[in-house]
Image (tube, grey):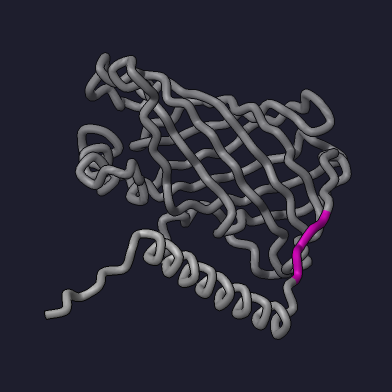
Amino acid sequence: MTQPRHPTPRVTQRARAYAKFGRACVVSAALASLAACTAVRVVTHTVDTTLAQAPAGTYQMDADHWSIVFDVEHLKYSRFVMRFDRAKATLQLDPNAPGNNSVKVAIDATSLDTNVKALDKIVMGDSLLDAARAPSITFESTRFIPTGPGTGKLTGNLTIRGKTAPVELDVVFNGSAPNPLTRAPTVGFAATGAFDRSAFGLTAWYPAVGNDIHVRIQAEFEQPAPGAARDASDATAN
C-alpha cells in the first residue's frame, strides 16, 4: 500500500510565502482602488500664539476637545490619575485688557473616571466627593495676570463638595485661528496647578493617599453663533 506523501518543510515554507504574497497583493490592490475613488484631504493650518491677537468675545469650551485630569500621590509609589468625562466652560476673552479675561468651569462630579469602576464609586461616595449631594465641581476665576505674550497666572475660586478655596493655575495660550473644519474662531489653552484636598474636607485615606492634588487641563474654545452662548453653571446637564 502506498503511503501518503507529506510535504517537505521546504515545500511548506514556499507555499506559505506564496500565500502571504498573494494576501499582500490583494490588500495593495484594494487600497489602490480605494485611493482612486476617494479624495483624501489632509487638514493643516497655522495658529497665532500671541494672546493679544486673539479675537475678543465669549467662547464656549468645545465639547469634544478638552481634558481635565487630577492626580494624587498613592503610597509614595506613584501618582494615581483620574479624569472627568463631562464638563462645560465659558471664557470671556479681552486681548486688549487681559485683566478682564475670565473663565467659569463646571465639572460633573459624577463623571469621574479612575479606570477602576469600584474605586470610582468610592471616590464619588460620601466619604470624598459626595457626588450625589454635590454633583458639580466649579471654578470661577477672579484675576488673570499676564506673564508673557502667551502665558499668565489665573487665580480663582474652586468649589468641591460645597467648600470653596482659592486656586492658582499657570496658563499657556496654545494659539488662535479659525477652525479649519467649522471656520468658527477658536482658541486653545493649557493650564496646570495644584490644591490641598484637605481644604475641601477631602481627608479620607491620608497619609496613604497624599493631600496635594495636581491638576492638568487642555481645552479648546469656540465662539458660538449669536444667541447660542450658554453659561457653564449647568455642566451637570447632558
For the point 27% across and 43% down, the residue is: 116
Q: Position of residue 184 (x, y in %)?
A: 76, 64
Magenta stretch mostly in which secondary structure? loop
Q: Is residue 10 above or below residue 21?
A: above
* Foreground of the two, 192 or 108: 192
Residue 115 is drawn in which quadrant?
top left
- Is 13 left or right of 119, judged from the image as shown? right
Range shown magenta? 41-45
Q: Is residue 222 above or below residue 104?
A: below
Q: Position of residue 157 (x, y in %)?
A: 52, 32
For the N terminus, the quadrant is bottom left
Residue 145 is drawn in which quadrant?
top right
For the point 46% across and 55% down, the residue is: 235
Q: Is residue 115 visible?
A: yes
- Is 72 left or right of 132, judged from the image as shown? right
For the C terminus, the quadrant is bottom left
- Is 129 left or right of 84, judged from the image as shown? left
Residue 35 is drawn in which quadrant?
bottom right
Q: How many marks?
A: 0
Q: Residue furthest front?
A: 1
For the point 75% across and 30% down, the residue is: 151
- Is 54 left or right of 4, judged from the image as shown? right
Q: Position of residue 63 (x, y in %)?
A: 55, 59
Q: Is residue 184 visible?
A: no
Q: Residue furthest bottom?
A: 37
74 falls in the magenta region: no
For the point 42% across and 42% down, the residue is: 83
* Foreground of the two, 82 or 229: 82
Q: Position of residue 65 (x, y in %)?
A: 59, 54
Q: Is residue 60 above or below residue 192?
A: below
